[in-house]
Image (cartoon, grey):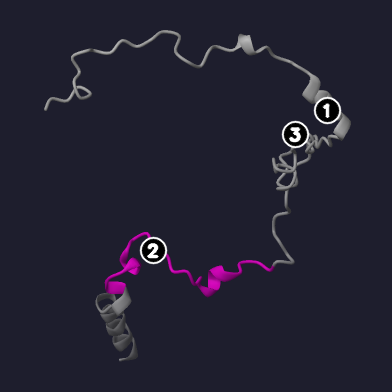
Amino acid sequence: MASGAKSFLQSLRRYIKKPWEITGPCVSPEYRNAVPKATEYRVFCPGTVPVKAIIPTSDPETVYDIKYFSRDQRRNRPPIKRTILKKADVEKMMKETSFDVNSFPRPYLATTIVEDDNAIGGGYQK
């Protein structure tokens, strides 16, 4: 009798579902419960690992460095150079002429613009 009732309850569980298993993310076939079962929680004790860790040995130059500060470009900048000018340096710079004014193009028009004489009132008709 007990086994019959047990099988009946199991068949009911297949058809009667919890409300959150009817709709929502739990319905998806790719859904996996976040809480692990007791058999898959801790398969082996952390102190008795069955496989020993393999630590790769190589040249230190070819090993990728995971430290952030060694790859940080803000820290690799050259130092900022500051120049302090004294009064004598400024006076010397003011006396130097490093360019000629005539070497630059003239900023103004060299030719005159001829306007239409028929443009009465600026070209608008009255």
Front residue of this view, candidates 19 and 2: 19
The first of marks 1 and 2 along the sequence is 2
The first of marks 2 and 3 along the sequence is 2
Please determine whether, in this image, residue 23 is positioned above or below residue 53. Answer: below
Q: Magenta residues, as a range?
A: 21-45
Q: Residue furthest left?
A: 126
Residue receiving disc 1: 91
Residue receiving disc 2: 31
Horizontally, residue 17 falls left or right of residue 110, namely: left
Residue 2 is situated, as x and y percent measured from the top left of the image, at 34, 90
Give the mark toward the camera: 1 or 3.
Answer: 1
Residue receiving disc 3: 62
Residue 91 is situated, as x and y percent measured from the top left of the image, at 83, 28
Give the mark toward the camera: 1 or 2.
Answer: 1
Q: Quadrant of residue 18?
A: bottom left
Mark 3: few, some, or many residues within 10 Å (few <14, many ≥20)?
few
Mark 2: few, some, or many residues within 10 Å (few <14, many ≥20)?
few
Instruction: For marks 1 and 2, give the CA distance.
Output: 78 Å
The amino acid on which the numbered mark 3 sits, given as a three-letter code, is Thr
Q: Quadrant of residue 86?
A: top right
Q: Quadrant of residue 80?
A: top right
Give the mark toward the camera: 2 or 3.
Answer: 3
Horizontally, residue 123 falls left or right of residue 5, namely: left
Mark 1, secondary structure of its residue: helix
Quarter of the rendering occupied by the N terminus: bottom left
Horizontally, residue 105 falls left or right of residue 91, namely: left
